[in-house]
Image (cartoon, coloured by chain):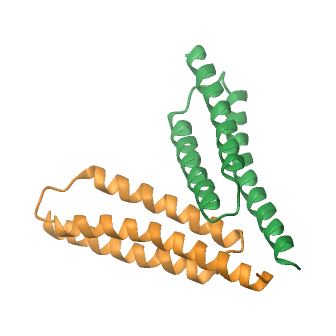
Chain colours: A orange, B green
Amino acid sequence: MSSSELMINLNIRAYNLLQEDADKIAKLIEVQMENLTTRKCPLYEEVLDTQMYGLSREVDFAIRAGLVADQAGKMILSKLERNLAQLYEALDIKL
Amino acid sequence: MSSSELMINLNIRAYNLLQEDADKIAKLIEVQMENLTTRKCPLYEEVLDTQMYGLSREVDFAIRAGLVADQAGKMILSKLERNLAQLYEALDIKL
């Protein structure tokens, strides 16, 4: 494998790993959105915040390690932040 | 640069980044150790736990991304965990 092929492979792998972890958080948000009628669980926010922090550290590391472009990494986070904002908005309306 | 040289460079860079972040936590622990005589700050534990969690996510990502060997990554964390245990032990004696 040439060094440019290796770099592309590593970039794709890193991006896919971040996206996988982001998808897990998106799934958590989705489940909570579907259960808006049930009582709000305060632990849920705590878990989501912790997961978001963990992912932001992964993204930051991937950018610093030269594996993922700054913009691509930040896009993964900002997309999730929009989902989260929607969830909190929906929870506020419900309460 | 050959692909094996590139891989070595990326490995070194990733390892150094993790070590840098670990050093920041070690420094926080050290400062708290030196200030055992002052009143224990509950926020300090919170901050250290959060920082440790963030680092563990970075290490885990670096291992999964194929940048850092499993053992090397885990060694960075376990060394810090020993420091932390010493700090908590010292705090317990002090209280």
Whole-percent x and y of residue A59?
58, 69
Corner quadrant of residue A74: bottom right
**Residue occupying the point 65% across, 43% down:** B77
**Residue that extends furthest to the left in the rendered view of this protein:** A37
> Quarter holding the N terminus of chain A?
bottom right
Q: Is residue B13 left or right of residue A71?
A: right
**Residue that extends furthest to the front in the rendered view of this protein:** A1
Whole-percent x and y of residue B88?
58, 26
> Quarter holding the C terminus of chain A?
bottom left
Vertical comparison of A6 with B20: above or below: below
Vertical comparison of A69 with A46: above or below: below
Vertical comparison of B41 with A35: above or below: above
Q: Nearer the viewer, residue A18 or B39?
A: A18
**Residue occupying the point 56% across, 18% down:** B92
**Residue occupying the point 22% across, 69% down:** A33
Whole-percent x and y of residue A83?
34, 75
Q: Nearer the viewer, residue A64 or B32?
A: A64
**Residue occupying the point 45% across, 62% down:** A52
Q: Is residue A88 left or right of residue B86?
A: left
Q: Nearer the viewer, residue A20 or A91?
A: A20
